[in-house]
Amino acid sequence: MIFLLLRILYSTLLLVLTPLLLLYLLLRSRKDKAYRLRFAERFAVWLPAVSARGGIVVHTVSVGEFNAAKPLIKHLLQQYPQLPLTLTCTTPTASDAVVKFQHEQQQLGRQLTHCYLPFDYPMLMRRWLKRLQPQLLLILETELWPNLLANCKALAIPTLVVNARLSARSAKGYRRFSALTKPMLQQISQILTQDTASAKRFRALGANNVAVAGNIKFELDIPVGSRQLAQALQPVVDGRVVWVAGSTHAGEDELLIQSYQTLKTQFPQLLLILVPRHPERFDAVAQLLTQHKLTFVRRSSGALPDATTAIWLADSMGELLSWYQLASFVFIGGSLIERGGHNPLEAMAFGKAVLAGPHVFNFQQVFNQLGKQQAYIAVSDAASLAAAIQQLIQQPEFAQQLGDKGLSLYHKQQGAIARIMLQAEALLPLAQMDIARFAGSTAWFDPAFFPQFEPGYFEPAFWQQQGLVTGHSSGRNTVWFIQHQGKQMVLRHYYRGGLVGKLNKDIFWPEPLLLSRAMAEFRLLCQMWRWGLPVPRPCAAHYQRRNFGYSADILIERIDGAIDLAQLLLQQALTSEQWQQVGGMIARFHRHGVFHSDLNCHNILLAADGQFWLIDFDKCDVRPSGSWQQQNLERLLRSLEKERRLHGGFQWQPEQWQALLQGYQQQFNG
């Protein structure tokens, strides 16, 4: 309740500050007009095409996060080619990079959707998410918005935060607003961090599902164009010692220029390639170079440096990797001032010697590892920077050793993407299913069962007309047995129970698609089937909109020769070993966190091959371990006792329960 009130307060504050937000964008647009464009996307007036629905959404904030995520995105495209992929961001520079990548992938026959992530207003987020209905939202690093995550939770959309990094300073800020941030973090399905320190901080803040996957930036995607540009520019810098200062900031450029001026007389062959972090500073840095009377050329002018050029001002976007390839050594910007430093991994990937200032808390873990290997040079000011560069110029073999150590560390730390893909797979149980949409209805189906899907598959009359109904069960609700292309299936319509069911037979209150009865059960069955649990194979699920709600159906594969435990025990007793098998089977479900809302002897089947199965997962879910596991067992015990009271020939005795518990404990603790 407190979290809801704080979200309302947060949303109200966001609404009140909207004029300031617009003013900020307009001010930014004075230097980059893209900031005043595409407002319809930011306010969810323009929505992605319906064809983007039901897939994966990957959100990156800026161009740095997007570039780091490209290898991961390519893996998603390769592993899930049937799923729509939507890439979102918040900055124009990132958008430009996404659009370029989008065109590259389209040439390979891969379709992507791109748009800005809407501002975090609750109704806008809900409208946007209901339009896309993604199976998974994957967020890079810590771009966490309360209304985005709350709406994902409400709409049953799994959220996966990857490459998450949380500094001690950021954790302190989160802790100040723990009443808002703790519930927000607990709504995330899984957080995969770069390092153990970040994982500990997330757990301390209350996050539930946290694991260390590593840093995806150790698996750099080097575009072909970047290599081609570096090769084209290499002759321009031949014979020069190339010092690249990447992603520099105001207050830092002055120190770099001071260091260069200390060195230029002794080393006239030294060329400084200065790469400011933000494009709005390009002109200011050019003025600074003019004031210091340094000869320089601007990349944007198209002019190339000659032997007398002191500095090459890289006032261009998206070319940092090319500059690093040309470097003799690299200074990491944002580290001589209290900015926290930028990513050293790109320089390490090319085997370049790395220099950095004292402020590297944004990438503390990486610099700690570099420090342990004595694989970079730490400097504190302009004088120490100049001295370090002098050493690298005079001892090129030392510079090479530093670069080799950094490259070796870079290779050893790889593997994060593989770990992320495993977790994404766990959160995408419907990934191998196809979607069919008809008038007012949506169906998920297994293409192995239905290469071509028909809307009539959920109607008993459709199968009856073709003579494919092999029987039916007339309990409280009718279940139809169907034969289709050599496969046996069960068709079940969802009915309401209790007093409400007498008045309203099968229309349920409106719910998001993934929370609807059939879709929720179908998704859980898909997950359990992939885990190898003994459940019926899911074939298809159906959501049909009605005037004031929806109706639902599910198709599952029929288990050959199966009989439920209640009927079986009227005919014969189970051996002690069989009761242990039943207990072991239940423990397998509990170890995966599967809560069965109605665990009774009618929902446990024994198949012709002697294997026990569990069925009927309507209103069931996956949850953390807790008292519900014991309550599940007690529910089964009560059902056995009830059947024994009702039927004199029911062949179960209370002492046999110990055999079941023995099998349960052996499997659960094994």
Image (spheres, rainbow, N blue to C red):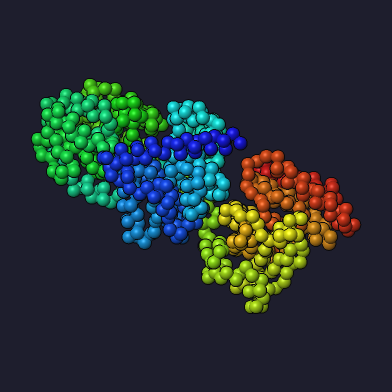
Q: Quadrant of residue 397?
A: top left
Most foreground residue, 403 or 334? 334
Q: Position of residue 343 (x, y in %)?
A: 34, 36
Q: Is residue 307 above or below residue 586?
A: above
Please provide percent x and percent y for residue 207: 54, 36
Q: Residue, x 43% and y 49% (percent of image)? A: 44
Image quadrant holding the N terminus, namely top right
Between 201 and 549, the residue placed more toward the observer is: 549
Location of residue 446 in the rendering, given as x and y in whole percent from the top left corner: 56, 63
- Residue 522's image quarter? bottom right
In this rendering, does residue 424 appear at all? no
Instruction: Please state if 290 lies on the left or on the right of 182 as rendered.
Output: left
Is 207 on the left-hand or right-hand side of 264?
Answer: right
Q: Residue at x 38, y 36 (%)?
A: 20
606 sits left or right of 126 in the view: right
Who is closer to the viewer here, 222 or 156? 156
- Residue located 80% across and 61% down the image: 567
Answer yes or no: is residue 512 visible. yes
| Quadrant for the C terminus in the image | top right
- In the picture provided, is 486 more to the left or to the right than 306? right
